[in-house]
Image (cartoon, rainbow, N blue to C red):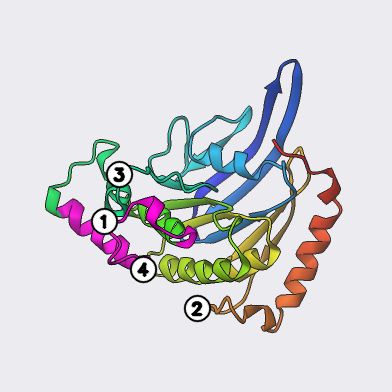
């Protein structure tokens, strides 16, 4: 796969008063076009910082982040970003929340085109019939589905997801992982998924990057050669799953006690 994203010797330092916090140190990696890449690591290792750099919400201290070979030097309108909190606007309906990105970035669409696009992605995430409901009338899982539809409606090349299911119970997390895979496989988009959960990372990803404790460096890279489509409910019993888990855990565990939130 040709790289759609490149991290070229990326380092990032934050300043808290007179104190320097080294978030990332000399990170070099590529993300293939259409790949589902998972990033795991201890808290504070710079996983979210990588996503923020990819989205152009901040700039690296040294090195560069490139999209299709060009440095990201401002807000990257080719990516969509699903954060840990859904950030749905409470005064807008599901349909209005999903449509929100279509009014940004100078995109010109007729009212009929907008309505058709919104309806398509509402159906895709399983929220048909709830278009006129407000966020307060939805369950946590439905809010996550609405957030995903809002991120996809813009039809970005890259979808960034920062622990989107971290706060959900185990059963609902499995359901939404399955929905995410089904949706992603139907779009062919590139997906960069940050998680603390090794089982989630192996279940979803083509490749898993393990980050070290702060300052975040790439500790290990594991290619996940499990067949698709994947059954997230039973994949942990698949041949080879335990070996992937053991290798990733071995790379991760030495740094866990050092992790701190940024």
Residue at the front extreme? 137
- Which element is circle 1 on? loop
The residue that mark 4 highlights is: 126
Q: CA distance from mark 4 to mark 1?
A: 14 Å
Q: CA distance from mark 4 to mark 3?
A: 19 Å
Q: CA distance from mark 2 to mark 1?
A: 33 Å
The residue that mark 3 highlights is: 100
User: Closer to the observer: label 2 or label 4?
Assistant: 4
Label 3 crowd bin: few (<14), some (14–19), many (20+), radius 10 Å = some
Measured as percent of width and height from the top left, residue 98 is found at 32, 51
Quick one: label 4 or label 1, which is nearer the N terminus? 4
- In the drawing, does residue 161 fall left or right of residue 12? left
- Relative to 203, is 220 above or below? above
Quick one: label 3 or label 2, which is nearer the N terminus? 3
User: Closer to the observer: label 4 or label 1?
Assistant: 1
Measured as percent of width and height from the top left, residue 203 is found at 61, 70
- Which element is circle 3 on? helix
Quick one: label 2 or label 4, which is nearer the N terminus? 4
Q: Which residues are magenta?
A: 113-141
**Which residue sits at x=37%, y=44%?**
90
């Amino acid at each position: 796969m040709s790289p759609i994203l490149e991290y070229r010797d990326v380092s990032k330092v934050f300043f808290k008063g007179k104190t320097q916090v080294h978030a990332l140190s000399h990170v070099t990696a590529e993300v293939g076009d259409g790949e589902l890449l998972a990033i795991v690591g201890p808290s504070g290792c710079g996983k979210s910082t990588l996503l923020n750099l990819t989205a152009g919400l901040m700039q690296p201290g040294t090195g560069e982040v490139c999209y299709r070979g060009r440095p990201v030097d401002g807000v990257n309108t080719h990516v969509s970003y699903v954060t840990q909190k859904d950030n749905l606007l409470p005064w807008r309906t599901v349909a209005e929340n999903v449509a929100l990105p279509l009014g940004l970035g100078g995109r010109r669409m007729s009212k009929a085109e907008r309505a058709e696009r919104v309806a398509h992605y509402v159906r895709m995430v399983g929220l048909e019939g709830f278009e006129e409901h407000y966020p307060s009338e939805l369950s946590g899982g439905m809010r996550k589905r609405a957030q995903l539809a809002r991120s996809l409606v813009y039809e970005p090349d890259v979808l960034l997801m920062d622990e989107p299911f971290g706060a959900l119970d185990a059963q609902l997390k499995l359901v939404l992982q399955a929905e995410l895979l089904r949706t992603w496989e139907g779009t062919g988009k590139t997906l960069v998924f940050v998680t603390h959960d090794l089982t989630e990372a192996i279940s979803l990803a083509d490749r898993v990057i393990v980050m070290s404790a702060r300052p975040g460096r790439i500790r290990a890279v594991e290619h996940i050669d499990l067949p698709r489509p994947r059954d997230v409910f039973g994949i942990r019993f698949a041949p080879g799953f335990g070996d992937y888990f053991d290798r990733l855990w071995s790379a991760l565990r030495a740094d866990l006690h050092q992790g701190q939130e940024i």
